[in-house]
Image (cartoon, rainbow, N blue to C red):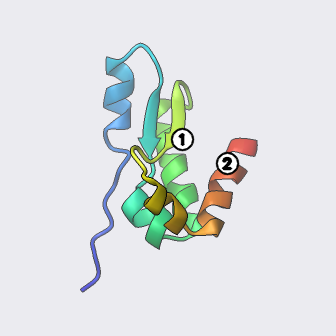
Amino acid sequence: MELARPRYTAHLARRTAQVKGAVCGGLSREWTMLRGTPDDVQREIADAITQTGGRRYIIGTGCVDADQHARVKPANGKSCGRVILR
């Protein structure tokens, strides 16, 4: 049975309105970074940027331990970097 892919950015627009500082998130560490593709990474970041208006937004997955970081697909990490460098 395939897992349903969760949508992690739905809360960013609400949170941006609630805080004075930046919000961090938008990427699923368990789904996108470990199981997804570079295109999935790009889509989630684009959705987060849309929801936050591209302001006060830090690309992130939330809490990540060393084991999870080691299991991230290299292509997905590079995909994040490509968005940052634009």
Question: Foreground: 49 or 80?
Answer: 80
Q: Please, which residue is most extreme toward the top here?
A: 20
Q: Earlier in the sequence, mark 1 or mark 2?
A: 1
Picture residue at 45% right of the left edge, 17% below the top: 21
Residue 86: tell me if it is visible: no
Q: Nearer the viewer, residue 15 or 77?
A: 77
Whole-percent x, y for residue 73 in the image: 57, 69
Up/down of 78 relative to 35, above or below: above
Where on the picture, by quarter, is residue 14?
Answer: top left
Q: Residues within 10 Å of mark 2 (few under 14, many from 20)?
A: few
Kindly report which numbered mark, 1 or 2, lies closer to the viewer in this rendering.
Answer: 1
Quick check: can you spot residue 42? yes
Q: Is residue 80 left or right of residue 56?
A: right
Q: Is residue 86 left or right of residue 26?
A: right
Q: Which mark is residue 75?
A: none
Residue at horizontal 28 percent and vertical 75 percent from the top: 3
Q: Which residue is mark 2?
A: 83
- Furthest toward the right, the residue is 85
Which secondary structure, mark 2? helix
Q: Residue at x 35, y 20 (%)?
A: 17
Q: Quadrant of the C terminus?
A: top right
Residue pointed to by mark 1: 59
Task: Determine whether label 1 and label 2 are within 8 Å by CB.
Answer: yes
Residue 45 location, x and y as percent? 53, 48
Kind of residue at disc 1: Ile
Distance from label 1 to label 2 (Cα)? Answer: 9 Å
Image height of 51 relative to 55, above or below:
below
**Residue furthest bottom in the image:** 1
Where residue 4 sits in the image (x, y, percent)?
27, 71
